[in-house]
Amino acid sequence: MTQTLQTVKDALTATMPKFAAVLPKHLTPERLFQVSVTTIGGDEKLLECSLVSLISCVMGAAELGLEPGGPKKEAYLIPRRNKKTGGYVCTLVVGYQGLLKLIYQSGEVTSVRAREVCERDGFEYEEGLAPILRHKPAIMHAEGRGRLVAVYSVADMKDGAVRFELMTRDECERIRDRDGGASELSPWSTDPIEMCKKTVVRRFAKMLPRSIVATMDNAEHTFDDEPLAMAAPVVTQQLTSPVSGPHRSLAAAVAGKLPQRAQTRPELEDEDIPFGAPPPADEDGEVQ
């Protein structure tokens, strides 16, 4: 059932104290509210998502210090249909820019970047004791650079070392397909190159503090009105609001539905699994 944008605004307003408690200094509650309202109000499918899942995903973005939507593309709010209930739920997907931000905040790198390699680019890559990575983009080619063939990421470490990772287009697409494919609503459809970049940058994620990895892993799962074993809600404690007036009853209603944080899961061991890949879905974008 579609809800009004005003209902979402009221729920976000009632949750502002909780947002303020977890937000880092660089992101204010007011900015989080503004970006969230603009993003949700601009997508009819998001307004069909359960209120609980919307607020949970915004809380997840707050804990990570990322904007859920907007021009920065740090994180995405993605609507997914839940086959069990027939309704939509919201999923938080961390974007390429958001992952870069978290890696920088770890303090382990001084610079990290990702680039796409196209078929007409000059490119040399070798592994071994003296690995080689040389790339000359064909930006002046009369027919353009051509189709994407690979992506790579380079990180300058705090200790002076330089690390790089490379993935072919086929490798990225296998991960995309394994994690739900490129449905119409997925960032794999709207920003495919950015998602490929994020996938290869994800291989540097082991340098992140375990607390960030756990929070990120928890935040990026589908939420539903009923706690599921697979879900790891980002709400750290029961949502209660000191707000008085008309928002009090709304906050209480949301608080009664938001589940507690599940037990923190161990760090992911598979470096190829990108953070924020959409949950498994069929061709219609439905959560299985």
Image (spheres, grey):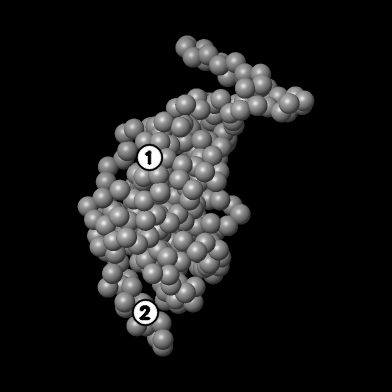
What's the amino acid at mark 1?
Asp
Q: Which mark is residue 146?
A: none
Q: Quadrant of the N terminus?
A: bottom left
Q: Residue at point 41% right, 86% down?
A: 246
Q: Which residue matches tag 1? A: 179
**Residue 74: in sight, yes or no?**
yes
Q: Residue at point 41% right, 31% down?
A: 174
Comparing 188 with 58, the one in front is: 188
Residue furthest to the bottom in view is: 245
Q: Which residue matches tag 2? A: 250
Q: Residue at point 39% right, 54% down?
A: 80
- Discs 1/2, front: 1
Residue furthest to the front in view is: 284
Disc 1 and disc 2 in contact, CB within 8 angstroms:
no
Answer above or below: position of 207 versus 37: above
Answer above or below: position of 46 versus 172: below
Q: Dot 1: few (<14), some (14–19), or many (≥20) neighbours within 10 Å?
A: some
Residue 117: x and y in percent read: 60, 26
- Quote the CA–CA distance across marks 1 and 2: 35 Å
Comparing 166 with 267, the one in front is: 166
